[in-house]
Amino acid sequence: MMRESERGAALLTVLLLVAVISVLAATALEKLRLSTRLAGNAAAGEQARAYGYAAETLALSRINSMLGKAGKRVTLAGNWSGTPFRLPVPGGLATARVRDGGNCFNLNGLVVQNEPAIYTAYAPATVQFTRLMRLVGVPAALAGGIADATTDWIDSDGAALPSGAEDGAYTGAATPYRTANTLMTDVSELRAVSGVTPQVYAKVRPWLCTLPVAKPSTINVNTLLPEQAPLFAMLLPDTLGVESARQMLLKRPPAGFETTEAFWKLPALTSVTADENAKAQTGVTTRWFALQVDVALGAADLEQQSTIDATTLPARLVSRSWGEPS
């Protein structure tokens, strides 16, 4: 016959076992709920990406159609730039926006490619980058050094430009690193360049791109928006201010310019000295497009940015990234 003390110990043991099993069961259920939620989120994310790809296909089709009709001239006619077109999808909505992806300063244009994978500094682009930074509010004392350092980051040699920075400027940091010595794949790489502070980056980021070619971007004078006037003013010496460039774009003919020669004959430009490099960087057509896709699918939201190369038709996708632009 069990003593009273033994009976109490047995009861306590049973209660402890019940408590332990309850905790294990609760933990297992929580892990199951978490796994189910993660699996659901992953499935929704993959579905959202699939809808993003569908929006890309639709955008490529529209770009090919527009360029086929436009011929040698692309304008803002048809209100295509930045206008959202919606693609209803089961359980959500995909929204795509296309804009001229060449109306920007191409950081990779700071160099030229002389041999495969060998890049050398291109001085006119360094001057333009310096001018652009000054125009958007970066102090002149910083702009020249940042332009040189960015060129050094991309070019293949190890010799720093007069105000630039090569490996020696980075290997002594708390977390050492080296220059890339190749083209940038994303504008966010600029953050690693000597002299680029968060404040400087915030000022210049809206005007920059990293097209996958070692040449300056061609500015389409028919699609450049008035608020993008610094991108035109940077092409010229300090003989044309941002406000003057903006007013000139506001007076652009509704149908745009037939040729770049017609643009450069504008009365507002008769007193402006433009070299051949500046004129060569303007055009009346668009060869690069930027696509932004936003997908809302239940609890899943997806942001996608893509770059489209239309230098030859049919246009093709050359890069894709997800998340907010950095």
Image (cartoon, rainbow, N blue to C red):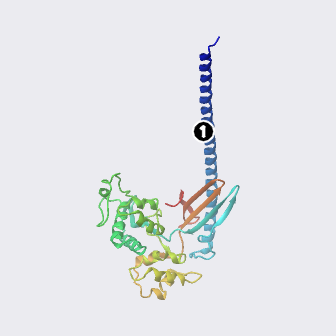
Visible residue check, residue 290: yes
Residue at 30 percent across and 62 percent down: it is 160
Picture coordinates of residue 267, whole percent (x, y)? 48, 89
Taking the image as shown, residue 34 lies to the left or right of residue 232, namely: right
For the residue pair 223 and 315, the one nearer the viewer reads as 223
| Residue sticking out furthest to the front | 4
In the displayed structure, does residue 83 sit left or right of residue 218? right
Q: Nearer the viewer, residue 188 or 122?
A: 188
Asked if residue 220 shows in the view, the reply is no
Q: Describe the element under mark 1 as helix, strand or loop.
A: helix
Residue at 67% from the left image edge and 62% from the top image edge:
87
The amino acid type, in three-letter code, at marker 1 is: Lys
Front residue of this view, candidates 70 and 296: 296
Q: Residue 217 appears at what percent x and percent y?
A: 46, 70
Q: Which residue is mark 1?
A: 31
Q: Residues within 10 Å of mark 1 (few under 14, many from 20)?
A: few
Q: In which image quadrant can residue 197 be found? A: bottom left
Which corner quadrant holds the N terminus? top right
Judge whether 1 appears above or below 201 on screen: above
Q: Residue at x 34, y 69 (%)?
A: 142
Q: What residue sits 45% from the left and 66% below the top?
A: 202
Task: Examine the rendered structure and indicate whether residue 161 appears above or below residue 265.
Answer: above
Q: Residue furthest top?
A: 1
* Rendering coords of residue 159 (x, y %): 29, 61
